[in-house]
Image (tube, helix red, strand yellow):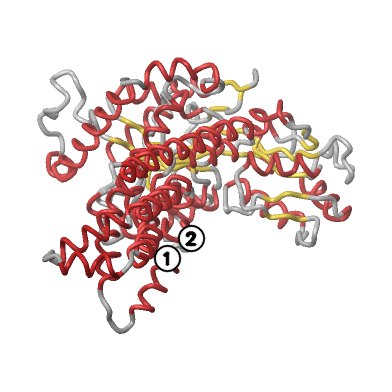
Amino acid sequence: MPIEPVAQLLSPFLDLPFRDGYVWSIIYVSLYVSVTAVALSTLFSVPVAVMIGFSEFPGKGVVKSVINTGMGFPSVVVGLLVLFAVSNQGPLGSLELVFTREAMIMSQFVLATPPITAISLAAVSGVDDGVRDAARALGGTRLDAALVVLKEARYGIATAILAGFGRAVSEVGSVLIVGGNITSADGISKTRTLTTAIQLEARQGQYETAMILGAVLVALVLTVNAVVVHFGDGGVNR
Amino acid sequence: MTIHRRKFITALGAGAVASTAGCTQLGGGGDGGSEGGDNQPSVAGETLTLTTTTSTYDTGLLDAIHTDFEEMYGVTVDAVAQGTGAALESARNGDADVVMVHARGLEDEFLRNGYGVNRRDLMFNDFVIVGPESDPAGVQGMDSATDALTAIAEAEAAFVSRGDNSGTHTKELNLWEAAGTEPGGDWYQEIGAGMGEALNNANQQGAYTLSDRGTFISQRSEIDLTILVQGPIEDGPEILANPYGVMAVNPGVHDNANYDLAMAYIGWITSPETQDAISDYQSNGEQLFFPEAVSENPDFQQYVPQGWSSDSSDE
């Protein structure tokens, strides 16, 4: 794992007021929760986007509007809804998910799904109809046609995934409510993410450390974007 | 690597809790648990969820003392810092096992409604009225907190209110009520935020605010505000006392509450050793919390809502 040498390299900058392993554990939780949520959301959203994009039905415009509206749904409200669901009093109470990463993944799934679906839908819809017709004309099945369109739309879908990731990793409202911002007594994160850690520092008036963590978050998002764009370009060059 | 191992252990622990959650109810006093080995207490691997106030968590007290409890029982304490109102609400919904808060009125309501059992007085510090050194309302050195608030209101000097249903906010509202003043107007700002943010906000605009002493001390080096009205720790008025209580969630209301571990926690945190550790905890060279659980005298009122007596018609 390359994480150890990187940690040592950056430690003069990152360790300032924090205990050993603290920053890395919150980065880990941030990535674990957001990447899992976005992966699940992608598996759900992209097929839905293809299905909607490929079919004509009454009320399609309404469905699109609903999805687009979902992009602006406040994360705090999503957090409250998920809390009601997973709380001991709620329908999923027996699973004991409140204040766990799983609950955080649930709320980020709800947050990431509208942008991923909407942008994927736009990307799929933007593929020239001729591509799909050609695929069918060459004897392809509906699935073949869908795969061809997905390949054409891959850059747009990568953008959709990045938008969903950006929404998930940067939101603070829902993970704070359903996750509880917990670390163990020795400072290793259980449900504390970069955003809730920033919120905690700000609450304590430690604006400088909050800014340091903010810079870490930006660097993280930048890295993920670079990786995804790299793979997107790799596909184009091939 | 430590991160991964830690996570694995956490996952193991969580899995163990999930898989034994049903058994705990039935097993009561069973054979000592299998997952922890012969020398481990049967609670080993369980998680205790504590909802508490921002002041106990943000001052670093809980992190400093919890390691001892975690090692003693082989368990994990999940401390969720929410503010008194939200901490009690989480417990009311059955999402916590034990609560540590500082608003006796709200605690009593919680007890009366049957959600909490076995309340103990835990520790105290006090509230202080802080403000800019220029002190535009001239409250410095007043020995009445209510007079000071009245003076601030009359001078219409900027005052920052937490506005978040926290213990400190509750105390502040009680003080205004005791002063017979209805705060309002441009000078009175409800910011809906934690104590640290409130102190910073007040610092930025040279406003007054009510703070618990612990949070103020832990932030004092970064802000220009100063204590203008002392609390009872420094011979100020008793009305500014800030007592913390700890209660277990009633397993009769929420049968998934980890009641035995909650009681172990209450026993541990009110023990002479832990009370000493609380007393020894310092920030910026000053003691933040004063233990009050260990006493020669029976203090029956700590177990029941204030003023409750078995002779009264109440209940």
How many neighbours does mark 1 have within 10 angstroms: few (below 14), some (14-19), or many (20 or more)? some
Image quadrant occupied by the N terminus of chain A: top left
Residue that badge 2 annotates? A74
Q: Position of residue A110 (x, y in %)?
A: 36, 58
Name the side, left or right, on which B258 lies relative to B114: left
Q: Nearer the viewer, mark 1 or mark 2?
A: 1
Residue at 21% x, 62% y: name it.
Answer: A146
Q: Badges 1 and 2: C-beta atoms under 8 Å apart?
A: no
Q: Is residue B63 above or below residue A89?
A: above
- Which residue is the site of mark 1? A70
Secondary element at image label 1? helix
Picture quadrant where residue A236 is located = top left
Q: Is residue B244 visible?
A: yes
Q: Quadrant of the C terminus of chain A?
A: top left
> Identity of the amino acid at label 2?
Pro
Task: Residue A221: give x, y in percent of width and height.
Answer: 46, 40
Gap in angstroms between the C-alphas marked 1 and 2: 9 Å
Instruction: Inspect the image, locate mark 1, and give the three-letter code of the amino acid beneath it.
Output: Gly
Which chain is mark 2 on? A
Residue located at (48% from left, 27% from top): B294
| Picture layout, residue A10 above or below residue B298 | above
Please indicate, yes or no, whether residue B119 appears anywhere in the rendered image. Answer: no
Query: Where on the picture, by quarter, is residue B58?
Result: top right
Q: Could you tell me which secondary element the residue under label 2 belongs to?
A: loop
